[in-house]
Image (cartoon, coloured by chain):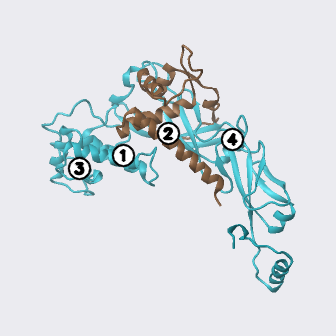
Chain colours: A cyan, B brown
Amino acid sequence: MEFKDYYKVMGVARDATEAQIKQAYRRLARKYHPDVSKEKDAEARFKELGEAYEVLKNPEKRAAYDQLGQRHSAGEEFQPPPDWGAGFEFSGAGSGGPGYSDFFESLFGRAAGNRGRGGVNQGRGEDHHAKVLLDLDASLQGGSRSFTLRVPEVDAEGRLGLKERVLNVQIPKGILGGQSIRLAGQGARPAGAGKAGDLYLEIDFKPHPQFRIDGRDLYLDLPVAPWEAALGATVKTPTPGGIVDLRIPAGSHAGSKLRLKGRGIPASPPGDFYVVLEIALPAAADDNAKAAYRALAAALPFNPRANLGV
Amino acid sequence: MPPTDAPLSAAIFEDYAILSLEELSRLCAVEAQRIIELVEEGILDILEAGSVEWRFSGACVRRARLALRLQRDLEVNLAGVALALDLMDDIEQLRRELRRRRH
């Protein structure tokens, strides 16, 4: 286990005041909160930050940690000394949770003490919530998918740990990003008798190689040749339901949007499928192609910059 | 643990769930008073405003949990949470608009 430098994590000096620590936490929490942050490693950074704050905001824990810090530096291999914690009385039971690092837990312990907050879950296990990444096809076609979840579990000694479990789930056809599946009885089991809680899986879609997802609607950028857009054509187009013959109306241009009503995600009501046209230009790669472009230029009096006044 | 043989099956929660104040509180693991505060701040909408018994749509679970996480983790008050949520909604709208126009 590595020694963690909580002062470095929070970007504060070792003699920082409580106010400075609080300020640093708030600033960094806004930056790395997984719900608002776009940073790549936001979730890991936020956990580390929460852990550092948990220690440094609490005078007892901070004092104990500071004693250790005089003997260790960040990244160093670390085992808590045998006399660790002697002479300190930490408020409450351990305040760790499943999200804390081994380092934190070796110092401050983990406890199942924050479960069933406010006694709202008496006689019934806690509900669990997990976010899962799903491929779009699962919603389009339905079908089963397996997810690996890390769930907190209380062991025989009453300590809270993380356990991996694989769940095989039938995906309801037409589910949308942000919606969830409630699996009754798949949450936590209560310590005594009583019903297990439920498990809620919140859906988030992986990016699709062809279609863009916008709520229940799907978008496809479809390249067409200039003459297909100008004269109209029937072209093969991939859609969620398979390849179809799509009629491109004459006089279409780049950005023209064709709507296939009800061909998006099969939710209720079903979404639409939009085809957005892109004009692909053939390269003037050989003499034939160059001649064709010159003939076109000669035949068409065309100023693409007319509306720029030049 | 290997996956169970038959996949677990359930409908889309948001399609059927209508929640009482107690049910929503339990799903968010907070006292009902905390949910009432979210409604009073305009963060959560009740179905059929004006009815005696409050009812919430299933989509309120996600929003309430998000609001409570922001309140706890960022140490902001409810007005701040409400503002953050409104701005997050706006950003999501803009992202969707970008996805529609991407070329």
Please name the residue that numbered disc 4 is placed on: A143
* CA distance separating discs 3 and 4: 48 Å
The image shows residue A282 at horizontal and vertical percentages of 77, 74
Foreground mark, 3 or 4? 4
Residue plotted at (79% across, 73% down): A302
Chain of the residue under the numbered disc 3 shown in the image? A
Foreground mark, 1 or 2? 2
The picture quadrant where one finds residue A159 is top left
Foreground mark, 3 or 2? 2
Name the kind of residue labelled 4 in the image: Gly
Q: Which mark is residue A29?
A: 1
Circle 1 SS class: helix
Can you say which quadrant of the picture contains the C terminus of chain A?
bottom right
Q: Left or right? Give the position of A214 relative to A185.
A: right
The image shows residue A20 at horizontal and vertical percentages of 23, 46
Name the kind of residue labelled 2 in the image: Asp
Q: Are marks 3 and 4 on the same chain?
A: yes
Answer whether labels 1 and 4 touch (C-beta < 8 Å): no
The image shows residue A269 at horizontal and vertical percentages of 72, 35
Q: Are marks 4 and 2 on the same chain?
A: no
Circle 3 SS class: loop
Please name the residue that numbered disc 2 is placed on: B86
* CA distance separating discs 1 and 4: 39 Å
